[in-house]
Image (cartoon, rainbow, N blue to C red):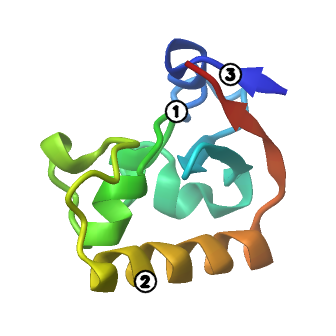
Amino acid sequence: MEFTAEQLRQYKGTEPSKPIYVAIKGRVFDVTTGNSFYGPGGSYAMFAGKDASRALAKMSKNDEDISPSLDGLSDKEIGVLNDWEKKFEAKYPVVGRVVS
C-alpha cells in the first residue's frame, strides 16, 4: 500500500478499529502489537502515524525531530537509524510506503 503523510496520520492509535503505523525511511510498519509503546500514552506514541526516521536516528522524542528528513545526520546517527530499522524489520510487518 502507498500512503501520503496525511493518510499515514490516520493510523496513530487513537481509533481502536485502526492499526498503528510508524514509518522508517519511507517504509510503513504495522506496530499495533507494540501498542503499549506506540498507542496513546505509550512512551513512543509521538511516532505513531508518522515517519520517525530523523527522531530515531537522533534518539529524540522532540516534535521538531519527528520527520522523514535525513539531511545533515552524522554517519553515527545513520547507523543508529539503520539499527532501529533492523529491529522494526525483525518485529513488525511492513505494510507499505510513504509517497510524496
Q: Amino acid at mark 3?
A: Phe
Q: Quadrant of the C terminus?
A: top right
Mark positioned earlier in the residue sequence (1 or 3)? 3
Q: CA distance from mark 1 to mark 3?
A: 13 Å
Q: CA distance from mark 1 to mark 2?
A: 26 Å
Mark 2 Cα within 10 Å, few/some/many (few <14, many 20+)?
A: few
Q: CA distance from mark 3 to mark 2?
A: 26 Å
Residue 22 in the image, given as x and y percentages of width and height: 57, 46
Left or right of 71 in this view: 6: right
Q: Amino acid at mark 1?
A: Lys
As drawn, 33 above or below 16:
below
As drawn, 53 above or below 89:
above
Nearer to us of marks 1 and 3 is 3
Q: Which residue is mark 3?
A: 3
Q: Quadrant of residue 33?
A: bottom right
Mark 1 Cα within 10 Å, few/some/many (few <14, many 20+)?
A: many
Q: Which residue is at the front of the view, 15 or 73?
A: 73
Secondary structure, mark 1, is loop
Mark 3 Cα within 10 Å, few/some/many (few <14, many 20+)?
A: some
Residue 9 in the image, given as x and y percentages of width and height: 50, 23
Q: Quadrant of the N terminus?
A: top right
Q: Which residue is mark 1?
A: 12
Q: Which residue is mark 2?
A: 79
